[in-house]
Image (spheres, rainbow, N blue to C red):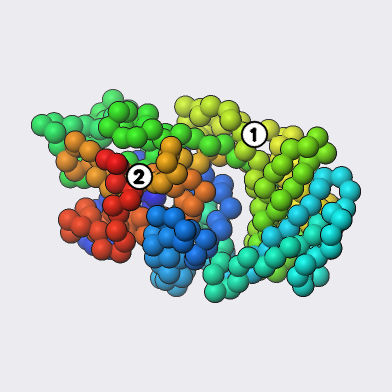
């Protein structure tokens, strides 16, 4: 959210500083799946934001001039069990690589409606294209005087600014306090496998483990021979920073096994990364995008849950319009008002 907002602010002629405690894309912005869908949010308030962002992603893939793995994909729904074969066979025609013990039930997305990207290089490309100054430091609080945000307190010093955007993901509440509704961190795991170059497909699974747990792993082949698998949730509390996020090898092993139930070749693939991150979520399931209540010149962009990568462009552009021009034009932000 911060990198996208910085990019669109820069396009409007504003100078931007990004403050990062660890590094750009060190959390979910670099470790999530990067799945994009045009119409999967149509039954919620997120629909217009998602549709606007899906179109902006296609434009960014042309405009940024960086290959970060953006491509359109066909998307499938599969059912599998950790032990034994699903009794029913495939209900739709499936690609040859899906030769495992799963049952593919439906095609749930096409090249017209679903896409993917690699989040870390995408977020980095946005930050670099913005020309923003990246400052390492711990953001401690908004610097407020007479009800107006004058900057941020960073490592005990005041970093002056004409406007401040809080886009700290699940750590936003640590800075905003009671100014905003509560932002929680939802932990998830992922593994990246290598050694098999698969087509432009995505797979969402209904998966039962041997001990009876019901999981929903997601499999995303990426260009260059990597396959990213995610979907394990964990209720561990949010650590102080992204550097403190712990990885559970057992959870990652479950994800790797799930991928092997879809594709037998993935049972022999090498695990090159085991990761965990926290997605920012709100109590009502909608992000916070807009002005921070009671503090002029302060804005927020967080709480996007599983749709952060998808909705970053329209969120960033809407905030840039709000900051530079006084109103968002790309999408109506009423449903995401932090004062709701």
Please indicate, yes or no, whether residue 53 appears anywhere in the rendered image.
no
Instruction: Using the image as rendered, state which of residue 206 and residue 130 is in the foreground.
Output: 206
Q: Which residue is mark 1?
A: 247
Question: Do callouts 1 and 2 mark residues in contact (Cβ within 8 Å)?
Answer: no
Q: Nearer the viewer, residue 22 or 253?
A: 253
Q: Residues within 10 Å of mark 2 (few under 14, many from 20)?
A: many
Above or below — where is 176 with respect to 31? above
The x, y position of residue 140, in whole percent, is 32, 28
Image-quadrant location for residue 265:
bottom right
User: Is label 1 or label 2 in front?
Assistant: 2
Quadrant showing the C terminus? top left
**Residue at 30%, 54% in the rendered image:** 333
Q: For residue 325, say whether it is visible.
A: yes
- The correct choice, above or below, for 238 with respect to 56 in the image is above
Instruction: Provide the secondary structure element on which disc 1 rests.
Output: loop
Tell me the SS state at disc 2: strand
Q: Can you give x and y, in whole percent of width and height, for residue 174 in the image?
A: 37, 29
Residue located beneath label 2 in the image: 288
Viewed as shown, does residue 48 lie left or right of 339?
A: right
Residue 272 x %, y % = 71, 47
Residue ID at (82%, 45%): 82
Q: Nearer the viewer, residue 173 or 211?
A: 211
Seen in the image, is 167 located left or right of residue 160?
Answer: right
Q: Residue furthest left?
A: 146
Judge left or right: residue 114 versus residue 93.
Answer: left
Q: Residue at x 67, y 68 (%)?
A: 107
Spot occupied by residue 227 in the image (x, y as percentages of width and height): 69, 56
Decide if residue 91 is on the left or right side of residue 30.
Answer: right
Give the image quarter of residue 190. Answer: top right
Cα separation, mark 1 vs mark 2, equals 28 Å
The mark nearer the N terminus, 1 or 2, is 1
């Amino acid at each position: 959210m911060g990198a996208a907002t910085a990019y669109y602010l820069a396009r409007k002629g504003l100078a931007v500083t990004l403050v990062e405690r660890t590094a750009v894309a060190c959390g979910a912005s670099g470790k999530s799946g990067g799945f994009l869908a045009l119409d999967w949010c149509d039954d919620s308030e997120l629909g217009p934001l998602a549709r606007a962002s899906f179109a902006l992603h296609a434009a960014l893939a042309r405009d940024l001039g960086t290959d970060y793995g953006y491509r359109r994909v066909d998307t499938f729904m599969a059912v599998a069990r950790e032990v034994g074969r699903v009794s029913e066979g495939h209900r739709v025609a499936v690609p040859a690589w899906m030769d495992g013990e799963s049952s593919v039930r439906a095609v749930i997305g096409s090249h017209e409606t679903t896409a993917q990207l690699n989040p870390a290089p995408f977020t980095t490309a946005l930050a670099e294209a913005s020309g923003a100054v990246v400052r390492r430091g711990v953001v401690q609080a908004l610097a407020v005087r007479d009800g107006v945000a004058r900057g941020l307190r960073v490592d005990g010093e005041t970093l002056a600014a004409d406007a401040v955007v809080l886009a700290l993901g699940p750590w936003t509440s640590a800075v905003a306090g009671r100014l905003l509704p509560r932002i929680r961190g939802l932990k998830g795991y992922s593994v990246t496998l290598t050694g098999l170059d698969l087509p432009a497909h995505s797979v969402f699974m209904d998966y039962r483990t041997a001990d009876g747990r019901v999981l929903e792993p997601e499999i995303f082949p990426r260009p260059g021979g990597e396959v990213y698998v995610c979907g394990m949730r964990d209720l561990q509390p949010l650590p102080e920073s992204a550097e403190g996020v712990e990885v559970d090898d057992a959870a990652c092993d479950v994800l790797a096994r799930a991928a092997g139930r879809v594709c037998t070749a993935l049972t022999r693939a090498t695990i090159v990364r085991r990761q965990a991150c926290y997605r920012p979520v709100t109590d009502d399931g909608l992000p916070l995008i807009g002005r921070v209540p009671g503090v002029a010149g302060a804005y927020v962009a967080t709480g996007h849950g599983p749709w952060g990568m998808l909705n970053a462009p329209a969120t960033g552009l809407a905030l840039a319009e709000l900051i530079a021009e006084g109103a968002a034009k790309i999408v109506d932000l009423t449903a995401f008002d932090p004062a709701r």
